[in-house]
Amino acid sequence: MTELEELKLEAEAILSLRVKTICQLYGGSADNVGSGEFSKDEETSKHEQKRYEKGRKEALEIAIKLTSQFYRNAALHSAFDFCMKAKDLAFATIIAKAITFDRIKEMIVQEHAEYFVLNDGRLDPTVAAALGPLLK
């Protein structure tokens, strides 16, 4: 591996960690959106939803640009978990389909068996995940 290739890989590692940090930074808003804690306070609810969406956008913009399969999958896993905190099953399903590492897929199924199953190596949403966005 050339020095330039090593530097590019290091930059991808840093960007993958940036995605994880963004998800942690906005994680409280994702929790609030998912729990509906502020559903009776329209102003706070809108603020938390906007904050969650901003974090999701930032995280995904970085993750999809990563060229290293390893770091892209790690970043997508962080973004997936972030969306699941917010109970954003529509985005979580899209992200799940982009994940290519079997170990991460298995972890998702273990942690979210109600919403995702493995079919021939693919992560597929269950009926609960497919109906979730429609029930909001």
Image: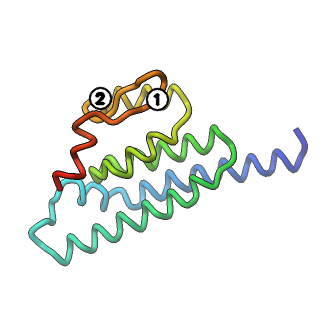
Left or right? Give the position of 40 relative to 117: left
Residue 119 sits in quarter? top left
Q: Name the residue that disc number 2 marks.
A: 113
Q: Residue at x 35, y 26 (%)?
A: 110
Which amino acid, mark 2?
A: Ala
- Residue 15, position in %: x, y? 62, 54
Indicate left or right for 46 with 75 as reference: left
Residue extending farthest to the top is: 120
Residue 122, disc: 1
Residue 9 in the image: above or below residue 25: above
Taking the image as shown, residue 87 lies to the left or right of residue 18, namely: left
What percent of the width, then of the height, locates residue 114? 25, 32
Q: Residue at x 20, y 52 (%)?
A: 134
Q: Report, in whole angstroms, how far the alpha carbon at label 2 lies from the one at label 1.
A: 14 Å
Q: How many marks?
A: 2
Residue farthest right in this picture: 2
Tag 1: Cα neighbours inside 10 Å, few (<14), some, or many (≥20)? some
Quadrant housing the C terminus: bottom left
Residue at point 44% right, 40% down?
96
Q: Which secondary structure, mark 2?
A: loop
Instruction: Identify the residue at horizontal 15%, vertical 75% (top origin).
Output: 42
Up the image or down, 106 lies above or below 18; here it is: above
In the image shown, does 19 or 100 lie closer to the viewer?
100
Secondary structure under tag 1 reads: strand
Q: Residues within 10 Å of mark 2 (few under 14, many from 20)?
A: some
